């Protein structure tokens, strides 16, 4: 059975980027497709931080710009940083206009302090529940607008492209991978907004569905990719064996929490004078190395003299479920894959290198985060660039709907056969990424990762579309990590431990470059 939807624009994903693009496209006819229910399983809804914006007297977009630039480790697109830091206040105003209530104390914003920000600058909602409130608010607002058709429970398999032009996307009913329930969304504009890649790692703070499917789909239609080697590990995920690992927001350290080992030693100071509030990559590496030496690592909030539960309701709930009392107990932590700075290469309007294909949010890479993202700049970037995509599309007359597609040609010939057996291999793949392409990597570990990918691929042919996408994304990231023979930001190579400014260039490549490499080096075909 097939269904066909036609619209001027189709958006994949219902986190902040997808929703914000959809509402900003008003009155253009839009279809928004999502794998589960609206907002469900999106990283946005899980965001505990908030939105970074220079709203205080001493602060300014220029200081925010400088902080972002400094964190980015020299590799960013300064124009993109200018755009997000300058537009931050407009986004806050827009959100307040549609009824979002940021936390305030005596009429002033209650701002969090997060690492490497000069000032308290992060606007939040109900403590650490910013993402949840923002997503719910946008969903309610979007539903009232009337120009958006929402289609839930659909997995997108691929982009329909002919002569470097997008014509839509093809998907299937999410629960029925093995059944012929194909859905075709015909549209000259496809916007990818499915979030990052966290779930290709064994330790991640991202929802299970977030494994880079947009990168995989865009790669397969030849889109340029950029900076894929830069994966940000959040230093403080709760390490109690829950998958995904619950995030303990950086704002907890902003309020003075320590990171200690089993001897109550605040070991981060060995690596950086700012200790717990050093840039995220440094804190994560420091924890990783301390663990490698056999130490235990903890967040210590025992000295807090405020109500932890009131300030951090989400984190508090996780701790209650793990029977941890933050006023008495040390909290076990581990670095976990949290955010991907790399992604589908887009310009300042969110356009990819494929005509009619756009990307925003974490699956895209504008260059605003460079090699290391400053906390709470991601929701900001998602809002700002979603608006820009919408503005650009709205400034152009609707394109002719394309009728030259024969859908039959795009229905997959081979069906995948077993999601259950795939689970074992998905876990092997995630462990491989953690071990060999994680917080630290080197030539040997990256080659070892390719050997594992090859074995997993051989043993799992046609097992699961998700695993296939995860394998492709893992290979692309590993390939990117091999190419960058230096250490910069979140990309740390133990065999090249220093920055090499002769390599100070964003790393752009496409799927064909990966294929050529695999063919010559590993005899792997895709
Ligand atoms: C956090 O709350 O620590 C995460 C914020 C972010 O990643 O920007």
Image (tube, helix red, strand yellow):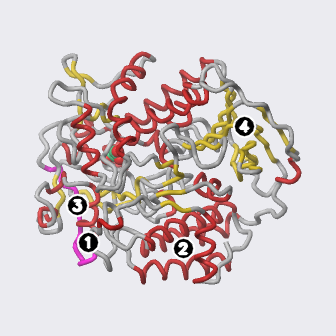
Quarter holding ligand 1: top left
Cα distance in 3D space between marks 2 and 1: 31 Å
**On the rendered image, what quadrant is the N terminus found in?**
top right
Which secondary structure, mark 3?
strand
Q: Residues within 10 Å of mark 1 (few under 14, many from 20)?
A: few
Q: Residues within 10 Å of mark 2 (few under 14, many from 20)?
A: some
| Ligand 1 lies under 8 Å from the Cβ of mark 4 | no
Q: Is residue 511 among the parts visible in the rendering? A: yes
Q: Are marks 2 and 4 in contact (CB under 8 Å)?
A: no
Vertical relation: 352 (above or below) 297: above
Vertical relation: 368 (above or below) 447: above
The image position of residue 148, as x and y in percent, is 66, 25
Cα distance in 3D space between marks 2 and 4: 38 Å
- Residue under circle 2? 428
Which secondary structure, mark 4?
loop
Residue drawn at x 86%, y 47% as measured from the top left = 407
Vertical relation: 447 (above or below) 145: below
Vertical relation: 522 (above or below) 323: below
Cα distance in 3D space between marks 4 and 3: 50 Å
**What's the magenta region?**
290-302
Question: Which numbered mark, 4 or 3, is in the foreground of this view?
Answer: 4
- Of callouts 4 and 3, which one flags the residue occurring earlier in the amino acid sequence? 4
- Residue under circle 3? 298
- Residue under circle 1? 498
Numbered label attached to residue 188: 4
The image position of residue 72, as x and y in percent, is 31, 52
Report whether 44 appears left or right of 74: right
């Amino acid at each position: 059975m097939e269904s066909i939807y036609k619209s001027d624009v189709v958006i994949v994903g219902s986190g902040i980027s997808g929703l914000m693009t959809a509402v900003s496209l008003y009155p253009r006819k839009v279809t928004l497709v999502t794998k589960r229910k609206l907002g469900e399983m999106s990283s946005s809804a899980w965001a505990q931080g908030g939105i970074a914006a220079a709203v205080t007297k001493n602060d300014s977009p220029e200081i925010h710009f400088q902080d972002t630039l400094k964190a980015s480790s020299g590799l960013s697109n300064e124009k993109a940083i200018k755009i997000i830091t300058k537009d931050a206040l407009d986004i806050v105003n827009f959100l307040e206009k549609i009824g979002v209530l940021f936390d305030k104390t005596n009429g002033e914003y209650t701002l969090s302090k997060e690492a490497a920000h000069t000032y308290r600058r992060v606007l939040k909602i109900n403590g650490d529940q910013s993402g949840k409130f923002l997503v719910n608010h946008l969903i309610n607002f979007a539903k009232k607008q009337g120009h958006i058709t929402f289609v839930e429970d659909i997995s997108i398999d691929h982009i329909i492209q002919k002569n470097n032009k997008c014509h839509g996307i093809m998907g299937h009913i999410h629960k029925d991978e093995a059944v012929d329930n194909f859905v075709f969304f015909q549209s000259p504009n496809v916007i990818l907004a499915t979030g990052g890649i966290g779930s290709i790692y064994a330790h991640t703070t991202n929802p299970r569905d977030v494994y880079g499917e947009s990168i995989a789909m865009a790669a397969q239609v030849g889109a340029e990719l950029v900076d894929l080697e830069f994966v940000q590990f959040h230093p403080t995920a709760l390490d109690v064996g829950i998958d995904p690992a619950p995030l303990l927001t950086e704002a907890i350290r902003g309020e003075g929490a320590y990171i200690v080992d089993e001897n109550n030693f605040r070991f981060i100071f060995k690596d950086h004078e700012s200790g717990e509030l050093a840039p995220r990559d440094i804190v994560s590496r420091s924890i990783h190395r301390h663990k490698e030496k056999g130490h235990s690592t903890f967040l210590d909030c025992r000295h807090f003299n405020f109500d932890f539960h009131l300030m951090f309701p989400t984190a508090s709930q996780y701790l209650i479920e793990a029977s941890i009392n933050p006023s008495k107990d040390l909290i076990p932590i581990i670095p976990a894959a949290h955010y991907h700075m790399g992604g589908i290469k887009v310009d300042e309007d969110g356009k990819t290198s494929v005509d009619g294909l756009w990307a925003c949010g974490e699956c895209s890479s504008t260059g605003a985060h460079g090699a290391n993202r400053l906390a709470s700049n991601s929701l900001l970037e998602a809002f700002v660039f979603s608006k820009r995509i919408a503005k650009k599309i709205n400034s152009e007359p609707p394109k002719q709907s394309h009728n030259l597609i024969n859908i039959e040609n795009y229905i997959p010939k081979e069906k995948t056969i077993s999601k259950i057996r795939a689970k074992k291999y998905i876990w092997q793949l995630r462990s491989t990424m953690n071990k060999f392409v994680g917080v630290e990597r080197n030539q040997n570990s990256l080659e070892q990762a390719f050997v594992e990918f090859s074995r997993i691929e051989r043993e799992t042919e046609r097992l699961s579309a998700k695993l296939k996408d995860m394998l492709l994304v893992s290979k692309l990231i590993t390939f990117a990590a091999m190419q960058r023979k230096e250490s910069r930001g979140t990309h740390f190579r133990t065999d090249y431990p220093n920055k090499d400014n002769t390599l100070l260039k964003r790393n752009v490549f496409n799927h064909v470059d990966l294929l050529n490499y695999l063919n010559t080096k590993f005899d792997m075909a895709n």
